[in-house]
Image (tube, rainbow, N blue to C red):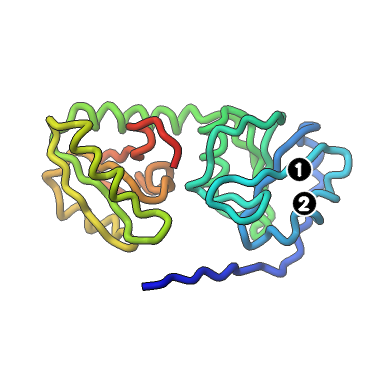
Amino acid sequence: MKTVFFESKDDMEIIIPKDLIKVLPKKIIMFTTVQHVDQIESMKNQLEDIEVKTIKLSHTKHPGQILGCSIRKIEENCDAFLYIGDGEFHPKALVLKNDKPVYSYNPYSKDFKSFEDADNLKKRQKAGLVKFHSSKEIGVLITLKPGQNRMKKAKELKELYPDKNFYFLMADTFDFGSLEDFNFLECFVNTACPRIGYDDNIKIFKPVVNIEELNNQEW
């Protein structure tokens, strides 16, 4: 079945708070979601005393656009990142992959905050990895969504870890509560959106590790 994607844009005017501008360092890279990419130049102009750069990440269409699955180690020189959008998944993923401060502004709630380090996320990741390596019965979460389906990588787990039993659980969108039906599983490997391993893991009754953390690879 052919899939067609349409960009949904928000016509709300984004005004970056002056209190946030005051604490931003002199050289930043700005990211936002597709809903707000049309306002990137306007937002740049509000940061007139700051050197603002936008870059294009993999899987994205526009410079400055961010997708959870496209966040990587960014080699471009900057002092920090600025994320404009709702939610905390994107800034958490940025700081986790780059170990640089991330400032975020939610244009809906008007709140802004900074993410200085990823210690808690790293501890959670490490706990998931330890549990994976000590477990034998592993559930593998596989989405049917185009662009996020990683069946090939999921199947490679059997070759990489022949001493473990892998059970492939496939869905378009996961009902995390239903995973409790598989109470014999000791751990889950997430091959879908990495958000599941960063944020949604608190909704799952057993530890979760993203497949990229096992294979040390980019999504």
Label 2 to label 1, Cα distance in Å? 7 Å
Tell me residue 115's x, y (percent).
Answer: 60, 35
Front position in the image: 24 or 51: 51
Tell me residue 48's x, y (percent).
Answer: 88, 44
Residue 140 - label = none
Write down the quadrant of residue 11 in the picture.
bottom right
Which residue carries the number 1 mark?
20
Could you tell me which residue is drawn at 40 percent across and 54 percent down?
148
Which residue carries the number 2 mark?
16
Is residue 44 in view? Answer: yes
Write down the quadrant of residue 38 in the picture.
bottom right
Q: Is residue 48 left or right of residue 189?
A: right
Q: Is residue 156 left or right of residue 43?
A: left
Q: Secondary structure at mark 1?
A: helix
Is residue 84 in view? Answer: no
218 up-or-down from 133: above or below: below
Write down the quadrant of residue 103 in the picture.
top right
Tell me residue 118's x, y (percent).
Answer: 51, 30
Q: Amino acid at mark 1?
A: Leu
Image quarter where the C terminus lies is: top left
Dot 2 crowding, Cα within 10 Å, few <14, some 14–19, many 20+: some
Cβ–Cβ under 8 Å for marks 2 and 1: yes
Q: Amino acid at mark 2?
A: Ile
Image quarter where the N terminus lies is: bottom left
Q: Is residue 107 left or right of residue 198?
A: right
Farthest residue, direction right: 49
Could you tell me which residue is drawn at 63 percent across and 37 percent down?
102
92 up-or-down from 193: above or below: above
Dot 1 crowding, Cα within 10 Å, few <14, some 14–19, many 20+: some
Q: Secondary structure at mark 2?
A: loop
